[in-house]
């Protein structure tokens, strides 16, 4: 990996009794090694994406693997030419990925993992329905051929969508196989656990998520169409985890392609076609001033305020 910055997307469902006690040593270690990004701690485990030097990332991952039942931490490594995060945050949360279904426990029941090299055969099977569990703006950037888009704004909307669409999706005869996927695998662990709890038996999910698929499956064999949205300054990535072509609207945090950027409703740092009607003139004026201050800071070669703020 020849990039200057190493990026690690990680998660692990486990049971932490005292998240607060885990937070300070983890945050301190990250800061000592110049690591930036976000880590979430909850009683159900750990989730996040961090970036830094290879040695720094190795040190943090080694520490996380010493936490209860984290030896088999799920990690996807990629590279970036520049640091994709402004600051380091370690947050305590109710869930490491918010679904809003308190009885769901991926440690108790979960779908069948499918390795990336076996995924094409599963989703090409006419007896399989394929569901993209990500948010609508992520799906718009890219998805698997033939996948169903729930058009959900957040992952919290997924249970209601499935319950309302269940009869149409599964029919009255022999239930189809259900294959689901997300960026790194964590939302699929919860969504397959949810479907199992709803009485759906034949449930599968892509091990390691889209990131692992794009890393390991050759582009000429791929059933992935488009790019994959990632929650950092890289915005999107493609096959081989190479940088994508999208930018980010810093007003609404949605990805924007070349056509969006050519729109009269796009103003860098202020608005894009998706959010222009959602914001007032006063809000856009505020964004415009923020963007001006950030541009001035960049010209002086200093980080803007977001780069040095502590954990919220």
Image (cartoon, rainbow, N blue to C red):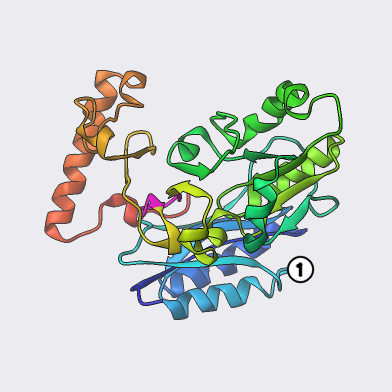
Residue 27 visible within the image: yes
How far across and how far down the image is residue 30, in percent?
49, 69
Which residue is found at the position 54% from the left and 42% from the top?
A: 145
Who is closer to the viewer here, 213 or 269? 213
Kindly indicate the quadrant of the structure image that contains residue 256: top left
On screen, residue 303 versus residue 169, left or right, reads left
Who is closer to the viewer here, 135 or 219? 219
Asked if 17 appears above or below 190 in the picture, the reply is below
Q: Quadrant of the N terminus?
A: bottom left
On screen, residue 243 versus residue 76, left or right, reads left
Residue 96 visible within the image: no
> Which segment is the magenta one?
229-236
How far across and how far down the image is residue 66, in percent?
69, 75
On screen, residue 125 versus residue 216, left or right, reads right
How far across and how far down the image is residue 116, in percent?
62, 60
Who is closer to the viewer here, 186 or 87? 186
> Which residue, given by chain and number where applicable, does mark 1 sit on?
69
Q: Is residue 231 magenta?
A: yes
How far across and how far down the image is residue 245, in percent?
31, 49
Asked if 47 appears above or below 251 in the picture, the reply is below
Asked if 100 appears above or below 172 in the picture, the reply is below
Which residue is found at the position 38% from the left and 57% from the top?
A: 85
Q: Main secondary structure of the magenta part?
A: loop
Q: Is residue 312 magenta?
A: no
């Amino acid at each position: 990996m020849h990039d200057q910055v190493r990026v690690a997307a990680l998660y692990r469902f486990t049971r932490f009794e005292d998240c607060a006690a885990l937070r300070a040593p983890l945050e301190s270690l990250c800061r000592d090694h110049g690591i930036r990004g976000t880590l979430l701690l909850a009683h159900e485990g750990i989730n996040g994406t961090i970036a830094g030097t290879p040695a720094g990332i190795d040190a943090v991952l080694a520490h996380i693997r010493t936490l209860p039942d984290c030896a088999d931490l799920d990690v996807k490594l990629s590279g970036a030419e520049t640091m994709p995060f402004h600051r380091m945050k370690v947050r305590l949360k109710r869930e490491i990925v918010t679904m809003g279904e308190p009885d769901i426990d991926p440690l108790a029941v979960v779908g069948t993992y499918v390795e990336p090299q076996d995924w094409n055969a599963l989703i090409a099977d006419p007896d399989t329905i394929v569901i993209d569990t990500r948010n609508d703006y992520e799906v718009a950037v890219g998805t698997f051929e033939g996948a169903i888009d729930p058009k959900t704004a957040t992952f919290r909307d997924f249970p209601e969508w499935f319950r309302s669409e269940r009869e149409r999706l599964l029919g009255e005869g022999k239930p189809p196989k259900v294959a689901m996927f997300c960026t790194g695998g964590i939302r699929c662990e919860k969504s397959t656990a949810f479907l199992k709890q709803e009485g759906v038996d034949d449930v599968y999910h892509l091990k390691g998520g889209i990131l692992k698929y794009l890393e390991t499956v050759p582009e000429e064999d791929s059933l992935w169409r488009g790019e994959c949205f990632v929650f950092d300054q890289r915005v999107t990535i493609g096959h081989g985890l190479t940088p994508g072509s999208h930018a980010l609207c810093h007003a609404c945090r949605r990805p924007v392609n070349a056509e969006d950027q050519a729109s009269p409703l796009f103003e860098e740092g202020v608005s894009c076609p998706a959010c222009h009607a959602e914001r007032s003139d006063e809000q856009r004026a505020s964004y415009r001033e923020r963007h001006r201050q950030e541009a001035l800071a960049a010209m002086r070669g200093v980080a803007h305020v977001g780069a040095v703020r502590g954990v919220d």
